[in-house]
Amino acid sequence: MTLEVLYFAWVRERIGLPRETLETQAETVADLVAELVAREDRYAAAFADTDALRVAIDQTLSEFSAPLAGAREVAFFPPMTGG
Amino acid sequence: MSVLLRASPFDPGVEMKRFSDTQEGAGGIVTFTGIVRDSADGPLRHMEIEHYPGMTQSALDDIRSRAMARWPLTDAMIIHRHGILRPGETIMMVATAARHRADAFAAAEFLMDYLKSRAPFWKKEVTDTGETWVAARAVDEKALDRWA
């Protein structure tokens, strides 16, 4: 499946990209993270502690255990600091 | 105009007046404004607020809708900046209008708690010595529990 993967804040800075289009067979968000971490050190650095990260699937906050079936866009970012 | 995301500065007094002029049946209005202050690391040059363009508007609409459904408000408003902000500028503002003040105060607190931890904004502080992403505080996440 083709996924748009977006990165924000320090996740974006560590990976060095705001977004990329990926071909993946990952079944869950955690599988996708494992694929990315295996690619290059900068991904490993960004995803070193997923407890410190949040994920949204198709613009809705989700969980790392969530399935990716039918998803078009996945975003990774640190806990939000609005307000 | 109940939810507004904007890059340019705004005057909370003007927005308060605009909001209050449209309220009928409200006995009171509560407003909260967040202001850019100096960093713990020293004088701030500026703050940068990044956001998730595809998600921000819907997240803010959802937070406002939850408040409207939970309390008998005549209206609720959220304004939030993104981009580069100077010290002293207004970061965001919420306003709630209700027949009774307890509802307006509670709804404003609810809006603030959700904006802190569930709206896709990330603040970076830029000082003379460098730049730092503002870390989320456990106490802010914990604050959501009272609305569960």
Image: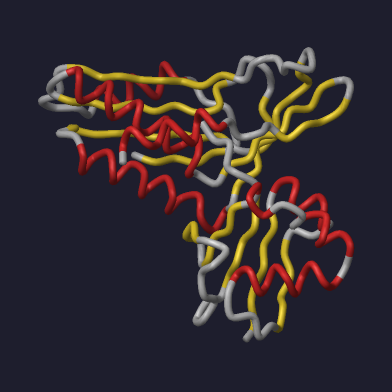
Residue B80 is at least partly visible in this image: yes
Q: In this figure, what is the number of numbered marks?
A: 0
When asked about the image quadrant of residue B6, the answer is top right
Is B116 on the left or on the right of B88, as rendered?
left
Task: Provide residue A55's location: percent of width, then percent of height.
Answer: 58, 58
Of the pair B95 and B129, the residue shown nearer to us:
B129
Q: Seen in the image, is A24 located left or right of residue B141?
A: right
Position of residue B140 relative to residue B45, above or below, is below
Name the side, left or right, on which A79 lies relative to B14: right
Residue B7 picture location, percent across and down: 60, 37
Compared to residue A17, the image places residue B31 above or below, namely: above
The one of A11 and A65 positioned closer to us in this rendering: A65
Residue at left offset 70%, top offset 57%: A7
In the image, what residue occupies the spot 78% across and 13% down? B43
Residue B82 place in picture, x, y as percent:
60, 38
Q: Position of residue A12 (x, y in %)?
A: 76, 53
Residue B39 drawn above or below residue B51: above
Residue B47, quarter of picture: top right
Side of A6 relative to B106 (left or right): right
